[in-house]
């Protein structure tokens, strides 16, 4: 099917303008003020609607294989396209963890059969799989994931020799979860001795504190500078960490970059009183002052890409006592809506949101032909209705876990239509069964 989108407000590469857009053979054929065609085409009246490049989420946990009672590739990728995210990069902490090339390719095979969004998967790093890691193909895999803090299974990399060798020899981007394990263990021991089983989620940012984040992030940055490695530090959560990053160098020239996640902007430590374990993430959501500093970092260019760290757990798991409840929660269906809500409330420009959610991830990861509204690029597009409001309810959730920290919240925009590789994949609550493609990367 070819599509002619008429008179949409297109936001792309720092400007917004009203234009027609023609989609043919899965790609953007033409962008012009008025387009007339002589072949069969489905015409879409987009007057009053915003047309954006689909969001690219560089950090999700879809729980397959091994943890599919919480989520799976099919359910969470449907939630993604319902939320205007057309491409995702998924993490290796599944069961078994993705620590061999064989296991990595098995995930790609699964996704080719059931992912409703475009996909890539990180290769996981452990203390003893460096040879496997260095075999990863940078044209077919988004990056290498290192947990420099606590994680599941044997994904924690705390061997100094392994870290040095990895940063010295990596031929592709390293993405890091940075929290210092020794600091966390020391804090946990201190608080459990003092409060025992009375610990609640309000202690989470005290146990996984500012120091644990900065010690680990600064260590990763020092290693990257030492070996001139491409480093991407995930989910920055503290004001202090912002000083590690540069807002002067264009992103295409940066070797060290950073990510901001929705929950670290949407919530702060006082919200633990009402949300409890539902906003228990690692790294922890921190103070109002950190939240304000992170917003400033977004607007001033210290934080390069926006993501979710979408990490579902069942409501029953999250309802356990604090020390037993797992960290993480579902966000991908509402991440773009969160950013659009901030646009409507004049906290950030639409042009900046598109840069953070689409352009910068595409540049940083060197994704081929995606992330921009350009002739010849894949038609991964989202039509937004800025005149409609959207209230999050249990009934309109697409997550397998069936809950959201945003339940009851009303966003000031609605995702109308999501195009995936030139086809309508989602339109106002209806899915069309379009499967995504494996992302490829320039070297």
Image: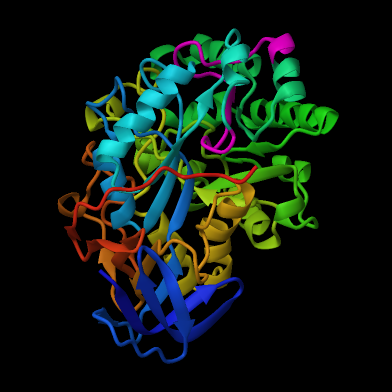
Give 219 or 201, whichever is nearer the viewer: 219
- Would you say 168 lies left or right of 98 here? right
396 versus 6 height, above or below: above
- Residue 349 is at least partly visible in this image: no
Number of dots carrying numbers: 0
Res 310 seen here:
yes
Residue 210 counted in the magenta span: no
Determine the image quadrant of residue 13: bottom right
Q: Please report the residue visible at 31 percent of the width from the left and 23 percent of the height from the top.
A: 65
Per the image, is 144 magenta? yes
The furthest residue to the right = 226
Residue 41 at what x, y percent from top left? 26, 79
**Quadrant assignment, res 229:** top right
Asked whether 219 or 17 is in front, the reply is 17
> Going by the image, does 299 lie left or right of 353?
right
Q: Please tell me which residue is depicted at 22% across the width and 50% down the height of the picture.
A: 397
Percent coordinates x, y for residue 36 in the rendering: 36, 90
- Residue 22 drawn above or below residue 224: below
Magenta segment = 138-162
**Residue located 78% across and 26% down the image:** 223
What's the image's color scheme? rainbow
Residue 62, position as x, y percentages in the image: 35, 34
Q: Which of the 4 quarters of the picture holds residue 63?
A: top left
Could you tell me which quadrant the N terminus lies in?
bottom left
Q: Quadrant of the C terminus?
A: top right
Q: Residue furthest front?
A: 38
């Amino acid at each position: 099917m070819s599509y002619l989108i008429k008179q949409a407000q297109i936001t792309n590469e720092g400007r917004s303008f009203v234009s027609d857009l023609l989609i043919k053979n899965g790609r953007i054929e033409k962008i012009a003020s008025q387009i007339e065609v002589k072949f069969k085409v489905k015409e879409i009246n987009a007057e009053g609607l915003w047309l954006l490049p689909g969001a690219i989420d560089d950090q999700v946990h879809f729980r397959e294989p091994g943890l599919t009672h919480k989520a799976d590739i099919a359910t969470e990728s449907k939630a993604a396209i319902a939320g205007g995210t057309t491409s995702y990069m998924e993490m290796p902490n599944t069961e078994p963890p993705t620590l061999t090339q064989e296991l990595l390719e098995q995930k790609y095979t699964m996704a080719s059969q059931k992912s409703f969004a475009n996909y890539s998967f990180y290769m996981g790093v452990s203390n003893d799989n460096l040879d496997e890691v260095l075999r990863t193909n940078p044209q077919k895999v988004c990056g290498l994931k290192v947990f420099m803090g606590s994680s599941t299974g044997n994904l924690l990399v705390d061997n100094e020799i392994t870290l040095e060798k990895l940063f010295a020899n990596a031929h592709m981007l390293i993405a890091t979860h940075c929290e210092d394990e020794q600091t966390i263990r020391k804090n946990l021991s201190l608080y459990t001795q003092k409060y025992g089983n009375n610990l609640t989620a309000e202690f989470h940012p005290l146990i996984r504190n500012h120091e644990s984040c900065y010690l680990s992030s600064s260590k990763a940055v020092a290693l990257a500078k030492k070996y001139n490695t491409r480093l991407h530090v995930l989910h920055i959560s503290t004001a202090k960490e912002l000083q590690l990053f540069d807002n002067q160098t264009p992103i295409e020239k940066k070797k060290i970059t950073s990510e901001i996640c929705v929950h670290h902007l949407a919530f702060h430590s006082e919200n633990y009183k009402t949300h409890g374990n539902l906003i228990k993430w690692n790294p922890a959501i921190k103070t109002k002052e950190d939240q304000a500093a992170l917003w400033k970092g977004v607007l001033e260019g210290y934080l390069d890409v926006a993501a979710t760290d979408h990490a579902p757990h069942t409501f029953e798991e999250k309802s356990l006592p604090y020390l037993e409840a797992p960290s993480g929660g579902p966000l991908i269906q509402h991440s773009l809506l969160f950013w659009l809500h901030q646009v409507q409330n004049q906290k950030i420009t639409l042009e900046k949101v598109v840069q953070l959610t689409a352009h910068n991830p595409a540049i940083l990861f060197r994704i081929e032909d995606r992330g921009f509204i350009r002739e010849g690029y894949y038609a991964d597009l989202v039509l937004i209705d800025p005149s409609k409001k959207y209230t999050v309810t249990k009934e309109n959730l697409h997550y397998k876990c069936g809950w959201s920290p945003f339940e009851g919240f009303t966003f000031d925009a609605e995702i109308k239509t999501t195009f995936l590789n030139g086809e309508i994949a989602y339109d106002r609550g209806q899915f069309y069964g379009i499967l995504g493609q494996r992302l490829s990367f320039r070297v």
